[in-house]
Amino acid sequence: MTDLTNFPIARRWPAAHPEQLQLYSWPTPNGVKVSIMLEEIGLPYEAHAIQIGKNETWTPEFLSLNPNGKIPAIIDPNGPGGKPLALFESGAILLYLAEKTGKFLSADPALRYETIQWVFFQMAAIGPMFGQVGFFYKFAGKEFEDKRPLERYRAESRRLLEVLDTRLDGRDWIMDDYSIADIATLGWVRNLIGFYGARDIVEFDTLKRVPAWLERGLARPAVQRGLTIPAAS
C-alpha cells in the first residue's frame, strides 16, 4: 500500500485512498482549475476540502506542502520515477497533469508553447486583475471613498477580456482544440461576472465571442463537476 505518512498534510487530512492522487483545494477560481482538469482526464483522485475561510491554508500541515499558503496543491503518489511528488501552484499542476496523461496540451512543440503562453496570460494577468475587481467591487474595498483603484482594475479587466475576445475570433477555444488554457481561464471569467457581480461594469455582454466561449466551456460535464469539487460545507 502507498504510504503518505511522510507528508504532514496527509496526517491532518488522511487519505482513504493513498494510492490515488491527493487534491487539497477549495472551489475558488484557482482551485477549480485542478478539479476540472482531473475530471476531464479521468485520473483517479481524492479531494480534501481546505477551508480557506477558516485559515486552514496557514496551518503547519498545509504550509509543509505549500509554503505560500494557497490552494490548490497535490500529492501524486505515482510521480516521476514512481515516487510521490508534491506540487503547488495551479498552473504548474495543470502542466504536470497534461504531460502526465498526454491530454489537453499538444505534443507539437510550437503548439505546446503557444498553449503555455495563454496559461501564463491567465496566471499573470486575468487572475490578479479580476481578483482586484472582486476586492474593490464586492468585498472590503467597496467601502473605499476613492474609486480610482476600482476604475483602474475594472478598465484593465475589460481590456484583458478584449484580448481574449480577439483571440477567440474564428475559434471555439483559446487554441484550436480545448486545452489547459481554457481550463485555466473558465473559472475566472465565470467568477468575475457571477460571484463578483461585475458583469455590467466590465460590459461583458458587449463582447463578441467570450460569452459564447464561456457558455461552451461551462456546458462540459467535467467542468460542471469540477466547479463543485471539493464540496464546500
Image: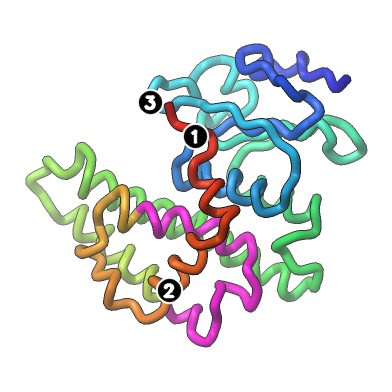
| x 58%, y 60%: residue | 119
- For badge 3, the amino acid type reads Gly
* Circle 3: element type: helix
* Residue 51: assigned label: none
Q: Position of residue 171 (x, y in %)?
A: 55, 81
Q: Where is residue 50 in the image (x, y as percent from the top left)?
A: 51, 26
- Place residue 104 in its image quadrant: bottom right
For marks 3 and 2 on the same chain, the one whose residue lies earlier in the sequence: 3
Q: How far apart are marks 1 and 2 (CA)?
A: 26 Å
Determine whether, in the image, residue 103 is placed left or right of residue 224: right
- Place residue 193 in its image quadrant: bottom left
Q: Mark 1 points at which residue?
A: 26
Against 4, is 79 above or below? Answer: below
Q: Nearer the viewer, mark 3 or mark 2?
A: 2
Against 23, is 159 above or below? Answer: below
Q: Which of 209 and 55 is in front in this view?
A: 209
Q: Nearer the viewer, mark 1 or mark 2?
A: 2
For marks 3 and 1 on the same chain, the one whose residue lies earlier in the sequence: 1
Q: How far apart are marks 3 and 2 (CA)?
A: 33 Å
- For badge 1, the amino acid type reads Trp
| 32 in magenta | no
Q: Name the residue under label 3.
A: 53
| x 64%, y 68%: residue | 115
Q: Mark 2 points at which residue?
A: 212
